[in-house]
Every structure is written in C-alpha cells, then in structure tokens.
Amino acid sequence: MAMELSNKMSRGIIERIKEISGQDPHLCMQCGTCSAGCTGREVMELLPRQVMRLIQLGDARVLHCRSIWVCSTCLLCTARCPRGIDLARLMEALRVINLRSGREVLVAEKIPVELLTRVPQMALTSGMRKLSA
Amino acid sequence: MKIPYFPGCTLYNKARGLDNSTRASLAALGVELAELPRWTCCGTVFPLARDNYMGMVAAARILAGVAGEGEDRLLTVCSFCYNVLKRVNYEMQHNLEARQKLNNYLEENYTGEIQVVHPLEICKEHVGFDAIRARAGRNLKGLKVACYYGCMLVRPALEMGFDDPENPTIMEELVAALGAEVVEYPHKTTCCGSYQVLHENDLVMQRVQDILNSAVAKGAEAIITSCPLCQFNLDWLQEKILEQDTGFRQIPVLYFTQLLGVALELPRESLGLEQHYVDPRPLLLGAMPHLR
Ligand code: SF4
Ligand code: SF4
C-alpha cells in the first residue's frame, strides 16, 4: 500500500493522538457532518472528515496539515458528530504534538501592531495558548 | 441578592463597557455583584488535551477560592471566562484524576460545588423576564435586534448546560422582554472565527461578513452578544470590510447588557456606548433622549 511507504506514522504516534485526545478515531464513519459545518472549512486544504481519515490510515501528513492551525475550537464538529467523536480534541492533540516539539504558527512579534493594540486581551491569551508553543 | 463576580482581564481593559453595563443593569434589577477580592486570568480557553492539567489550574484556583469564602455561586459574563470556568468546574465534579491532581497542586480540597452562572441565567431564573418586562421602559419599541451567541456560550452542551446548543433562545426572550423586536437569522451559533483573527484574518473577515449580512438581510438594526471577542470581530472588522466593499451596510454590535441598560434607562456613563467602532448611539437616540 502506498500509504505504508513513506507516510505511515509509527504506532506510537497514533497511540499518543488517542491518549492525548481520549478519542477513538476509528469510530468515524466518514459521513462528513463535521466538515459541513466547520468554521475554517473555506481555508482548510483537508476538511475535518479527511483529517479523521488520515488519522485512521496512520498517515503522518496529518500532523503537518494547515487545517489543525485554522481550527478555531468552536466545537461545532464535536456537537454534531453522529458517532459521538469529540473532533476538537483530536484537532488539539495534533496541535499539541507539534507545539510540544516547538513547532508553532502564531509568533507574537508577527501580529500587526494595529491589531495588537485593538484586540481584546482574551484573543491574545487564547490565540497564544492554542497556536504557539 | 448578592453574587460573587469574576470580571476577567478583558473587562478591565478592552471591554469596560461590558463590565460597567453588567454591574449597572444587574444592580438596577436588584442583583448586586461583589467582585472577588483577588482574581487572576481564568486561562481563557479550556484545554482540550486530556493531559494538560496546567491549563486548568487558573480556573480551578479561582473556583476553589470562591468556595473557600463560603459562597455557592460565581457569576461571570464574558463567554470565554464562562466557558472555561464552567468546564473546569465540570472536570472537578466528574473527573477524579483532574480533581486530585489540581487539588494536590493547589493544596485545596475543591470538588466542584460552586455553580458558575451567567447574567442571562440570572435574568431568566432569578429576576424573571416578566419582572424585567415590567421594569423596562418602552423606549426600545420597534427596534429590530439579532442575537448572536457564538460558540463558547453554548458548546459543549453537556458541560455548559446553558440552553439548546443549536437553537438557544434565552437572549431572544430577553430582547422580547425589553420590548424590542427579535430578528431570526441562521447564524446565531456559528463561530465568528474567534482568536483566528490573529492568524487567519481573511477567514475571520469572511465569517463575520456572512454573519452580519445574514442578520442585516433579515432586517436587523443591531446585533447583541455577550462575548468581547465576538463583539470585536463583528464590530471592528466592519472597518476593514468597508474598505473592500463600499456597498457594505454597517450595523452596531452591542453587548446584551448595554441593550438591557438602555431599556432600564440607566445613565449613559454606565453603558460604554462610545467604545464601539460602529457607533450605536444614532440608532439609540430615540430610545435615550439623554444621549442627545
Ligand atoms: S461527523 Fe464524525 S463520523 Fe462523520 S465524518 Fe466527522 S468525525 Fe467522522
Ligand atoms: S472545532 Fe475546529 S474543526 Fe471543529 S468545526 Fe470548529 S473550526 Fe472546524
């Protein structure tokens, strides 16, 4: 299988994703309900359903997709998944595995000053918590 | 009635209007908010990684502190504070590992006995919408208002236990009690993009435009919310949207407590209406003759 050649994640990482999220990605039946309502769907290259599929397949590319950083943890997917999967926790697991090894997307110095002086404090705190290491 | 109050960091800075109007309007309804003597940031977001107890420490400390004062309730109004305090409280009640780890760390013995409440719940359950209807002036008559809940107030449903997660109505009930007209539109619980404004600005602009256009198309003249970040995204980004789309119709985005304050004819100083990008005062002039 092509997947097995270069992108297969080690069993260890799948177990870590499951452990950190507390979710079983194999419950996903690929119905796409999560993707349909997702806040970030318009700029995601992989929709939440596809993220789920890559995890099921053990495809390591899922750790590096933009979708996990676009997710605004709005929990709409979690609220609607007919299989009861808390997808937002899986998205978070994929982020924290990156963050804990130092990979981040939000760098404080790069936030435009105009925005920095205007946004509410909680936006900075939550953004830094979710998107920076 | 006196309730311990956690304002949160944003209400001390960018969302003073929410803080002032919450205190003033609840006081007018006979509910006194007693700000906690010592408090810290709540952490703003509930950590979704199961092994991240660090992210729950701040909220757990705040809750345990309130319980230590012999109180049984804590009121907060910012949607993010409300979400994280309520969810951490839920963990302290139901997740024995979290309870033990956090209590060991904080040297506390807290088991989730505090009830985290929101002013909307106080309005509905303690004051009562009928009492509010009787107390409100008739100055909002005919004003068309769209209610925006966003994500944090209602999700996840089990932990938040706030209202129907797909179709909450508590804000609409308040609007009706204030004598204004409720505008129904499909986006009241979709997310505005939240903190992604820092990282995926275009995405948030798109979300905001969808939400605003939908409310305006249904005839809304104002939008109300309880979240400082929703308020910021929906209000300030209109400046940027206008730069790109000159045909765009602006709409004021208020805190629900400001609308409540207007209906209760509170003095203008307690409402913070001058802090918005889209000035709501022209719309409310008729309702508030003293603003003229
Ligand atoms: S809604 Fe649930 S079951 Fe359906 S695709 Fe998404 S994760 Fe899978
Ligand atoms: S929590 Fe993330 S993945 Fe789920 S709907 Fe919201 S933005 Fe999309």
Image: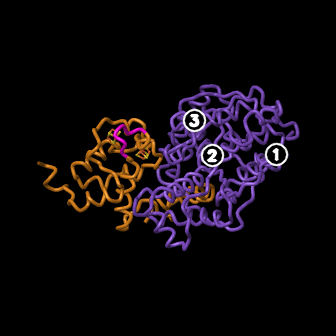
Chain colours: A orange, B purple
Question: In the image, is the residue at mark 3 within 8 Å of ligand 2 by its beta carbon?
Answer: no
- Label whose residue precedes the other's in the sequence (1 or 2): 1
Q: Nearer the viewer, mark 2 or mark 3?
A: 3
Instruction: Kindly identify which chain the residue marked by label 1 belongs to.
Output: B
Residue receiving disc 3: B168
Q: Are marks 1 and 2 on the same chain?
A: yes
Say which residue appears at 41% left-offset and 40% top-offset.
A42
Instruction: Out of A100 and B217, give the one closest to the viewer.
Output: A100
Which amino acid, mark 1?
Ala
Residue receiving disc 2: B231
Q: Mark 2 and mark 3: span between their CA atoms?
A: 18 Å
Question: In the image, is the residue at mark 2 within 8 Å of ligand 2 by its beta carbon?
Answer: no
| Chain part drawn in magenta | A80-85
Which amino acid, mark 3?
Pro
B91 part of magenta stretch? no
A81 part of magenta stretch? yes
Ligand 1's quadrant is top left
In this view, B72 is above or below B181:
below
Residue receiving disc 1: B28
